[in-house]
Image (cartoon, rainbow, N blue to C red):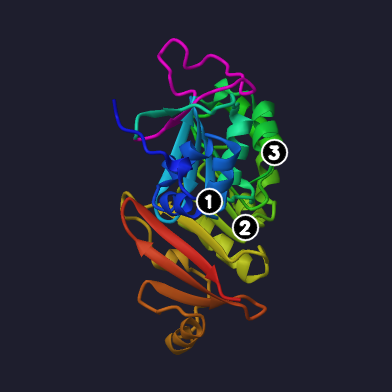
């Protein structure tokens, strides 16, 4: 039998000193003992800088506190027979501390909503959550998840998630800050374009897209990871020079260069690049180091931008950075 330490018989200042030397996993366990212990842990003001919710076959709460990531899993006691069975997240559930093989049970039975409220209180997190949907998430009913999680500012949906479920997620979760989609779940182009025109801070898209989609992008930063053609990028750059995408600060694009067929002169055909002296001045004024893989251009309204080119195989990467 392991010896016990009478922590709560110590003076309060001594308890706090002991708590300051515990990691967040231990603090969470301590906070569940009583209301007093919860208040003592909360008084440490140990603030999570970011909280992610990962939803797959299991439901995970991941906290970034300082450097390390601490993760608590729910519904991960699965086998091949029940991993796709629906889950009622309103029912009580135990937490599993990832990497430590430890199960945590609250003194009063907690469901997912209770766990989330407790963790957010103890680790002083009041901002909207960040949510990732992965393969297997279909066992969780979307409306119940929305009711439990509430507002989010980051939303990511993986390629393995079914189209029908992805549509439900996009319908219920409105992330005003950042959205990342591995694929287009819609049959009609106009449906996915509703997301291109949103004024996100960051929009990331991994599926096929058209020039029209690029021109509709209204986010501050847009990252398109599916390879396109050098001619399409050339057309986009010309449209940008003439005033398209006025809100955009960055856009990342790539070209399939498996056959080493991409040519910089084709990519920049018909586009006026400033001379080397002006490029150096533009880069210095905006904290960039000019090099041979970069060219500077100006929009018709004189707004400068740099095009950084990474000539690699199998992908030829292009990053346009607008310098306001």
Q: Is residue 243 above or below residue 84?
A: below
Residue depicted at 60% across the width and 38% down the height: 35
Q: Percent x, y for residue 29? A: 47, 36
Mark found first going from the N terminus, 1 or 3: 1
Confirm whether the magenta stretch covers residue 100. no
Q: How far apart, in angstroms, are the residues tagged by discs 2 and 3? A: 20 Å
Q: How far apart, in angstroms, are the residues tagged by discs 2 and 1? A: 17 Å
Q: Give the magenta part as a residue range.
A: 75-99
Residue depicted at 51% across the width and 80% down the height: 286
Q: Percent x, y for residue 3? A: 31, 32
Can you identify the residue that label 2 sits on?
201
Which of the 4 image quarters holds residue 113?
A: top right
Determine the main secondary structure of the stretch shown in magenta.
loop
- Circle 2 — which element? loop
Can you identify the residue that label 1 sits on?
50
Residue depicted at 48% across the width and 52% down the height: 16
């Amino acid at each position: 039998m392991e010896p016990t330490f009478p922590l709560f018989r110590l003076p309060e200042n001594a308890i706090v000193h002991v708590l300051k030397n515990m990691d967040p996993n231990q603090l969470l366990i301590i906070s569940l003992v009583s209301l007093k212990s919860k208040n003592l842990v909360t008084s440490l003001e140990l603030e999570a800088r970011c909280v992610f919710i990962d939803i797959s076959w299991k439901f995970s709460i991941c906290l970034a506190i300082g450097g390390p990531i601490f993760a608590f899993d729910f519904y991960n006691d699965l086998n091949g027979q029940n991993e796709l069975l629906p889950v009622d997240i309103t029912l009580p559930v135990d937490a599993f501390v990832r990497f430590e093989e430890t199960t945590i049970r609250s003194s009063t039975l907690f469901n997912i909503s209770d766990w989330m409220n407790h963790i957010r209180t103890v680790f002083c997190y009041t901002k909207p959550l960040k949510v990732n949907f992965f393969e297997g998430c279909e066992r969780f009913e979307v409306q119940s998840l929305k009711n439990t999680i509430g507002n989010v500012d980051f939303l990511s949906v993986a390629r393995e998630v079914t189209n029908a479920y992805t549509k439900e997620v996009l319908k219920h979760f409105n992330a005003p800050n950042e959205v990342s989609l591995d694929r287009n779940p819609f049959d009609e182009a106009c449906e996915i374009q509703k997301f291109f025109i949103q004024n996100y801070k960051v929009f990331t898209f991994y599926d096929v897209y058209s020039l029209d989609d690029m021109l509709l992008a209204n986010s501050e930063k847009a990252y398109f990871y599916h390879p396109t053609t050098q001619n399409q990028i050339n057309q986009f750059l010309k449209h940008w020079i003439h005033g398209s995408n006025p809100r955009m600060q960055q856009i990342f694009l790539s070209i399939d260069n498996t056959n080493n067929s991409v040519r910089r002169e084709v990519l920049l055909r018909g586009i006026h690049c400033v001379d080397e002296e002006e490029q150096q001045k533009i880069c210095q004024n905006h904290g960039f180091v000019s090099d041979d893989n970069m060219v500077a251009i100006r929009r018709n309204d004189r707004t400068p931008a740099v095009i950084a080119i990474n000539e690699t195989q199998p992908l030829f990467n292009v990053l346009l950075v607008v310098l306001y």
